[in-house]
Image: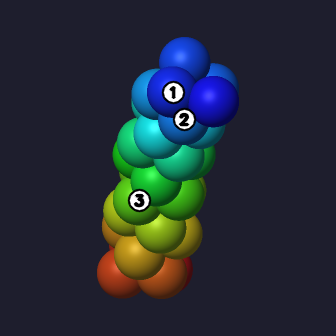
């Protein structure tokens, strides 16, 4: 379970970074148009 937990934490971290990146792109496009 400990190994799985660390793996899950890593996946959540990556997902959070992806979401932030997508939000940044959307905000940039909104300001550009």
Pick the residue in front: 8 or 29: 8
For the point 63% across and 30% down, the residue is 1
Task: Choose mark 2 or mark 3, whichever is in front.
Answer: 2
Pick the residue in front: 9 or 17: 9
Q: Residue 30 appears at what percent x and percent y?
A: 48, 81
- Residue 8 position (above or below residue 27): above
Disc 2, disc 1: CB below 8 Å? yes
Q: Name the residue that disc number 1 marks.
A: 2
Q: Name the residue that disc number 3 marks.
A: 20
Q: Residue 20 appears at what percent x and percent y?
A: 41, 59
Q: Is residue 28 visible?
A: yes
Q: Disc 2 versus disc 1: distance between alpha carbons?
A: 5 Å
Q: Name the residue that disc number 2 marks.
A: 5
Pick the residue in front: 7 or 3: 3
Query: How many neighbours does mark 3 have within 10 angstroms: few (below 14), some (14-19), or many (20 or more)?
Result: few
Secondary structure category for the residue under label 2: helix
Q: Disc 3 versus disc 1: distance between alpha carbons?
A: 27 Å
For the point 46% across and 53% down, the residue is 16
């Amino acid at each position: 379970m400990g190994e799985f937990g660390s793996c899950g934490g890593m996946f959540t971290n990556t997902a959070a970074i992806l979401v932030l990146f997508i939000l940044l792109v959307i905000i940039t496009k909104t300001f550009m148009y």
